[in-house]
Image: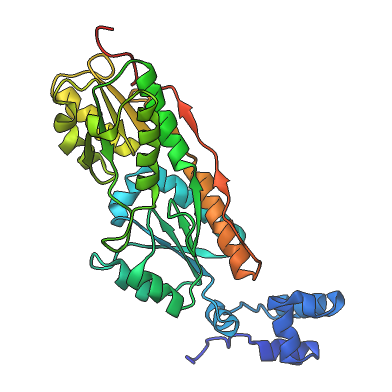
Amino acid sequence: MHAGEKKRCTIADIAREAGVSKTSVSFAFNSPHRIGDETRKHILEVARRLKYVPDPSARNFSLGRTQTLGFLLPQAVDTCLANPYIVEVMKGLGQVCQEHGYMLTLIPPLNDSVYEAVKNATVDGLITLGYMVHGGVGSLVDVRAMPLVMIDGGEGGRHLSVNIDDMGAARLQLERVLSLGHRRISILSLPAPTLTPNVDDKGIVGRRLAGYREALEAYGLSLDDLRCLQGEATWQAGWDLASSLAEGGTTCIVTMSDVQALGIIDRLGDDGLSVPRDISLVGFDNINRGMASRPHLSTIDQPGFEKGQMAAMTMFDILDGKSVEKAPLVGYSFVDGGTLAPPKGE
């Protein structure tokens, strides 16, 4: 200790001054239900008078916790922050973490490896977005005994997942398109959200494609009658694939991400095409809020903020030792924006 530096007040100092045991002081801060109210008030008053500042690292060590939840990102941090849907999920997670006195750590793939990111994560629980957890990553989570809650993950597996009815939402999305008379339709899908290859896709992509199939069957069509491409949930993917999606007389493009749709609008504009005058466009997520400079997308609304909240609340229930059999299902709706119209000339 340097000359003139005041000695930090410790639990032992409080115990001596208050005339109680160090265990009682610990209970006053960490397990108040284990001591009487008057004793706790007395200890806290002594601690205030001695200007005691708890050491979070020592407390966390004694509790065997880090007071931190990890959010496993599906993409690099800058890419995720450019997606308003993911940002809304983060906000929901962050609000609940703050209410519980927890920090939220963003965990992007480490050197493009999700396995390495999970292996090095120092958190009490892990929340994923858009992943299906299988193979090595699933085994690693089990070995580390790390609670895991998914958002937009698989259904019916060992890990809980907060989802919308993706199949129903996709069916509704395409039904709106078909009901206006569109038949020359292109679909821009998301990549299969599995963490390991060669695993049947039971995640959001598989469920949404199943919804598209149901909608098409009602009109005597199949996915084989449509042009189906695949791309990341990024503006760049929409930009890069827009021309291919629009060729061949396509009258409507259906995407699984609003961010993709924005890239498509920009590229089509550069190609001299106007949405929806020349070609219609439908998105998924509803990131319309706060986007006054663009035409509001016709899209499926799925509340990212609410998903984040529910995932975090589910995680804290697990950490508190509560039995959680099933994660809640979040609602969805179709938003009539300004990018869907009947085919040109009809």
The reply to whether residue 338 is in sight is no
Q: Nearer the viewer, residue 5 or 186?
A: 186
Image quarter of residue 99: bottom right
275 vs 32: above or below: above
The reply to whether residue 87 is in sight is yes
View extreme (top): residue: 345
* Residue at image location 50% in from the left, 64% down from the top: 103
Q: Specify whether 13 is left or right of 40.
A: left
* Residue at image location 37% in from the left, 66% down from the top: 134
Q: Nearer the viewer, residue 269 or 329?
A: 329
Could you tell me how many numbered marks the image carries?
0
Image quarter of residue 75: bottom left
View extreme (front): residue: 220
Q: Nearer the viewer, residue 334 or 264?
A: 334
Residue 246: x and y in percent read 18, 26
181 vs 189: above or below: above
268 vs 166: above or below: above
* Residue at image location 71% in from the left, 90% down from the top: 22
Image quarter of residue 21: bottom right
Q: Specify whether 326 is left or right of 178.
A: right
Residue 174: x and y in percent read 37, 28
For the C terminus, the image quarter is: top left
Instruction: State how the image is colored.
Output: rainbow
* Residue at image location 46% in from the left, 28% down from the top: 334
Q: Specify whether 181 is left or right of 56.
A: left
Q: Nearer the viewer, residue 5 or 339?
A: 339
Residue 243: x and y in percent read 14, 30
Residue 225: x and y in percent read 23, 29
